[in-house]
Image (cartoon, rainbow, N blue to C red):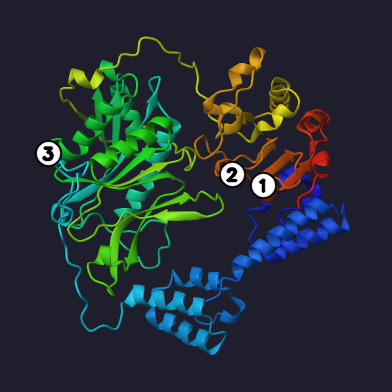
Amino acid sequence: MVDLDPTEHEIAELGPKIKDIEDADELREMLALEEDAEDRMPVKQLIESRIEAVEEDDEDADPSDVDLTELTIADVANMVRDIDDVAILEDLLEREKDGKDRKGAISQIEDRIESVAGTDEEEAIEVEYVPPEEKYPDLDHPTADKQYVEGVAGESYRDMWVYCETQQGDLLDVSKEMLGRAREMMDRYNSEPSGSDEADTAAYGGDEEGAPEDVVAVLIGDDVADLTEEAIAYGADRVVYHEDDRLGRFRHKPYTEIFCHMCRDFETDWRDYHEPRYNIFPATHNGRDLSALVQGELDSGLASDCSDLYIDETMISNPAKTGAPGESKRFQRVLHMPRPDFSGFEYSTILCIDKPHRDFHPQGASVIPGTFDLPEPEPDREGEVVEHDIDLPDDWFQIEVTDYDRLDDGVDLSGHDVVVCMGRGIDREDPTHGIELGLELADRFEDAGFGLTRGVITASYEFEGHVEQYITEERQIGESGQVVEPDLYIAAGVSGAVQHKVGMDESDTIIAINTDPDADIRGFSNYFIEGDLFEVLPRLTDALEAGEFAKLTAQASDD
């Protein structure tokens, strides 16, 4: 007997539930139940798609006995990059030569062998190090006068620092999300290593001396002292804050100087290291600015708009990092920073690796809001609160803001069950009416958010009446806006540009409405309705009121 009987559910309900089923046999029983009952084509296709996904996961073969003739060169490349056993790699190499003998596959395996074991050269030739001022004596380097331009090597680094952005006296949700994830990573980082543990962050038993490392929250603003205990409740071991009436609005110069002074030059008993090991920022408008400025001032790197974070070791053979060609070196305590590629279909993992004569610390990342779950606060957590106090020169505040508008409440689209998003298809008839139709549909759901693509926000549409108040950047969904993962995402008049895809493609069920049958969004939607949003949205709204929404959407193509 299956736990989930598809005949008892509408298609919209099945999508989120079926993703948790990992047993292919159970899914086949569900398929049989559906075929014997209502025999709904969309439901059968949904179950069959899940069966394919589960069986594909089951077929992740052991490299020791995988049939290389059934793999593409890309498959071989993806497989070998995670293999650190030279014997297994050499066996794969021999079997490839005895089989299809593809140059591309052989090259991928040989490169991995070299990365793990190095070359057969008896003695590697060390890469000669030449200081920048000697290598480029005539170069007018823009950072020539910086104290830290060349960096240092072999210094001490500790702790994970989290910049906690605030708004109107409150911690932003993304600040809480980052604190929660930082707490998870550092708890695991401080635990004793265990070969059988498959956690997503390596365990090191603390720093190089075995002492636990901390999560340090950074607060900067005009009224942040009252938020220090809340930051501790969400995971910080220590909170360093700087409060000044002139810091009510984000300012590049003072915020950057204050943060860098805190983590590099602040003289205090607990900060007995050169710089933080890791710096984490929110990928908000202000967070993106600050992260680049701080990491640049500290002469390190930055991975922006990350969609995950974890700490692990990694094997590197690049001679610029190892110091000698043909040698491989295992780097420990590396922050792995996955982020979406510009294609929107692939993810790259960014690493900030030291090299001889040069340390790249702090390893820095900015995190897309909504990437991590919002943790539950622990009001009884204990931590240390440290006030940071330096003189802020008047020339850091040369610009005075005399007047500005402030929204009463921010817009957070990440916590809704349903999100309705409108794209530039609203200009097919009347942009104002198009927005009204989207709002009407969103209002019919119990818990729905209303979002927009960047194209709508940046276009020169003239909106009338109450609609104008909804056309704000804070409703933007995508790479430079919010990231949402609702149970149901309805995209009306959205083309599906990769920048938008990054912000919503983790939604459980995606329904797209577009007049163009070849629109990009069709490729990653569960259901595609080829039609004009001005005709389709009213029908969806009426069907929702009549309790026939699932029946109507089941008529759409899920191809």
- Identify residue for label 3: 269
In this view, which residue lies farthest toward the front?
138
User: Depth check: 340 or 102 in front?
Assistant: 102
Query: At 16% from the left edge and 63% from the top edge, which residue is drawn?
Result: 129
Query: Which residue, given by chain and number where applicable, does mark 1 sit on?
Result: 520
* Tag shown at residue 127: none
User: Cα distance, mark 3 to mark 2?
Assistant: 47 Å
Give the residue number, with chain letter if any, for mark 2: 501
Disc 1 on helix, strand or loop?
helix
- Residue 374 higher or lower than 474, as above or below: below
Whether the residues at callouts 3 and 1 have beta carbons within 8 Å, the answer is no
What kind of residue is marked 3? Asp
Who comes first in sequence, dot 3 or dot 2? 3
Q: SS at mark 3?
A: loop
Q: Are marks 2 and 1 in contact (CB under 8 Å)?
A: yes
In the rendered image, residue 509, in percent from the top left (x then y), is placed at 68, 45
Image quadrant in which you'd find residue 117: bottom left
Mark 2 or mark 1: whose residue is earlier in sequence: 2
Q: Which circle, 2 or 1, is nearer the viewer? A: 1
